[in-house]
Image (tube, rainbow, N blue to C red):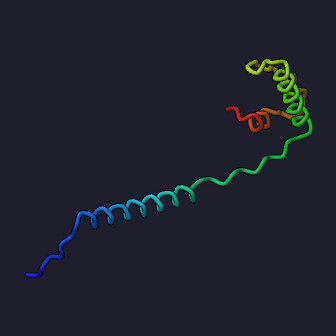
Amino acid sequence: MPRLIPTSRRAWVVTWAVLCAAGLAVTFGINASSEPDPQPEKPVSAPCAELIAGIERQLAKNEEDGRKDGVVAFSRVRSSGEDDCHEALRDHFGGE
């Protein structure tokens, strides 16, 4: 019958620590590689860029006046052929 090699608690602890560290490193590597690439900014039409700039100016004015928590609302009536800036506004301000 083969003779077993005696193992100490210290050897078991070191083995488990190495295995845990390796598992964490692999998990971190997998998570980092599976993150989606940042999307490039979509080009914005001139009327939409102008609308966004106007909203930014109004927000800056409100902040200067001490109204940081206020709501800014804009209303526009679109004529035929005019750009719908809904997506550009959502992309710029991060709303859903």
Q: Tell me the quarter of the picture where residue 68 sits.
A: top right
> Relative to the observer, which residue lies in front, 83 or 58?
58
Q: Position of residue 55 (x, y in %)?
A: 85, 27
> Relative to the observer, which residue lies in front, 28 or 45?
28
Q: Is residue 57 above or below residue 65?
A: below
> Relative to the observer, which residue lies in front, 51 or 56?
56
Q: Position of residue 35 (x, y in %)?
A: 59, 53
Say whether residue 81 is visible: no
Report the quarter where the C terminus lies.
Answer: top right
Please identify the residue farthest to the bottom as the structure is shown: 1
30 horizontally vs 71: left or right: left
57 horizontally vs 9: left or right: right
Q: Residue at x 76, y 51 (%)?
A: 40
Q: Residue at x 76, y 18 (%)?
A: 70
Q: Position of residue 91 (x, y in %)?
A: 75, 38
5 horizontally vs 40: left or right: left
63 horizontally vs 19: left or right: right
How many numbered marks are there? 0
Say whether residue 17 is visible: yes
Report the quarter where the N terminus lies.
Answer: bottom left
Q: Tell me the quarter of the picture where residue 47 sits.
A: top right
> Relative to the observer, which residue lies in front, 26 or 2?
2
Q: Tell me the quarter of the picture where residue 48 sits.
A: top right
Q: Position of residue 63 (x, y in %)?
A: 81, 23
Q: Is residue 16 above or below residue 57?
A: below
Q: Residue at x 78, y 33 (%)?
A: 89
